Image (tube, rainbow, N blue to C red):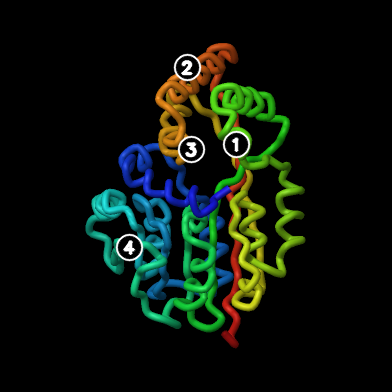
Amino acid sequence: MATAAARRHGGVFDEVAAEYDRSRPTYPDELIDHACRVAGIGSDDRVLELGCGSGQLTRSLLARGLHVAALDPGKHLIALAEQNLKGARDLEFVNARFEDARLPQNHYPAVFSASAFHWIDPEVSWQNAARVLVPGGTLALIQYCGLTERYSIGDQEALLSALTTIAPEVAADWPSYRDLAATVAGAEQRSDNVSEVWSWLASHDLVWPHASRLFGDVQIAVVPIRVKHTADELNALLGTLSFYHRITPDQRAALQAENVAIYERLGRPIRSSTVAVLVTARRSTHV
């Protein structure tokens, strides 16, 4: 869970910027298109992206003709995003924490954030997002979540068993994997408050009771995805996850070795199932 103490570890991504850029997945085009339709935005509209990282989502937003203000606190990630998107027009970078950034109020028709919103203090994130949006503007949050299905359940259980043995302190707080129906149903049951929806989906402590006054019309869209990894690919991905940098070097080595052993026992790529989730919410006009 992303408690205040855990959120301090968000800076690790800047330390592994190149690895993050190589190993982290992009986001499904259909979800980004859906978010733009919900927000009613298109070419030449201005949007804010929170936690742009090395530019995975930024590139997709620019491809839709949007003017993007891309914010990230990591100086190495910003530099890499600038390199990756060199020559792009209608793009400005803001190297700052969202908690501290000086951004225009009532300005953006949409605010996007992919796999980053949980690193912002929830006492600030929901309120600041509402503040920078125009009345009726759309907050669009995207995240990959674990998924339980027959295709991958055996492999995922083997990986979690290894994690439990090697780093039980991490496994104890590992996000819950649910089937697709339960994932969607749980989100819909909490749709009166977008912070409760996002906390449920992202498995982070992001609930802020007052968010229900700031945002309404909460909608959920999902794209299930099946993934195959070699041991080397999986270990490279692990190196970009925050928990990996909180465990000891011996634990890291043991976890990597066990992933290789699982891969060799299976005699095929390691399977996992994820679901790309989009949550949109409209800023209340009376705020």
Q: Residue at x 52, y 18 (%)?
A: 258
Q: Quadrant of residue 105?
A: bottom left
Kind of residue indicated by mark 1: Arg
| Precedes in sequence: disc 3 or disc 1 | 1
Q: CA distance from mark 3 to mark 4?
A: 23 Å
Kind of residue indicated by mark 2: Ala
Q: Residue at x 23, y 55 (%)?
A: 86
- For mark 1, what is the residue? 226
Which tag is nearer the camera, tag 4 or tag 1? 4
- For mark 3, what is the residue? 243
User: Residues at badges 3 and 4 in contact (C-beta under 8 Å)?
Assistant: no
- For mark 4, what is the residue? 96
Q: CA distance from mark 3 to mark 1?
A: 23 Å
Kind of residue indicated by mark 3: Phe
Q: Secondary structure at mark 4?
A: loop
Tell me: residue 164, above or below residue 102.
Answer: above
Say whether residue 237 is visible: no
Q: CA distance from mark 4 to mark 1?
A: 34 Å
Kind of residue indicated by mark 4: Ala
User: Residues at badges 1 and 2 in contact (C-beta under 8 Å)?
Assistant: no
Residue occupying the far bottom of the picture: 286
